[in-house]
């Protein structure tokens, strides 16, 4: 699955297209070292296929590489972070 990113000003998103459907994680950059993940959108056609999980894991890896932290306001992303203790180095719960 190819995951792309787009950022304009302080707003951005990571997204992918699977089986003709687009899924995304959106965020706001609060500072150079803090990103607020505010939404994960996965179409019903892709539910249960691990697309949201893949996007969340990609954001975590991007944070590690970029040296920034994540504040998860999105309920899905927060639930994933609670399940993945190994993400706590970059996720502020």
Image: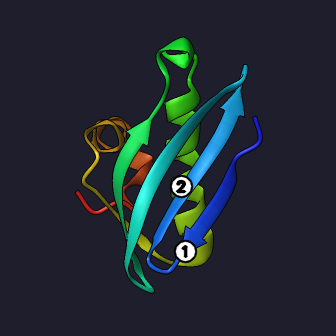
Q: Residue at x 49, y 23 (%)?
A: 43
- SS of the residue under disc 2: helix
Q: Position of residue 45 (x, y in %)?
A: 55, 13
Q: Residue 46 versus residue 66: which sits nearer the camera? A: 46
Looking at the image, residue 78 lies above or below residue 20 = below
Q: Residue at x 44, y 78 (%)?
A: 10
- SS of the residue under disc 1: strand
Q: Quadrant of the C terminus?
A: bottom left
Looking at the image, residue 58 lies above or below residue 42 = below
* Image coloring type: rainbow
Characterize the local packing of mark 1: few (<14), some (14-19) or many (20 or more) Cα atoms within 10 angstroms. few
Q: Which residue is mark 1?
A: 8
Q: Is residue 22 left or right of residue 31?
A: right
Q: Quadrant of residue 89?
A: bottom left
Q: Position of residue 52 (x, y in %)?
A: 50, 32
Q: Nearer the viewer, mark 2 or mark 1?
A: 1
Q: Residue 92 versus residue 18: which sits nearer the camera? A: 18
């Amino acid at each position: 699955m190819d995951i792309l990113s787009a950022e304009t000003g302080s707003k951005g998103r990571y997204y992918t297209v699977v089986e003709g459907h687009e899924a995304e994680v959106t965020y706001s950059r609060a500072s150079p070292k803090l990103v607020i993940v505010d939404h994960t959108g996965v179409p019903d056609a892709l539910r249960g296929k691990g697309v949201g999980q893949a996007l969340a894991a990609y954001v975590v890896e991007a944070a590690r590489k970029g040296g920034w932290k994540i504040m998860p306001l999105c309920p899905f992303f927060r639930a994933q972070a609670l399940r993945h203790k190994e993400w706590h180095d970059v996720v502020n719960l």
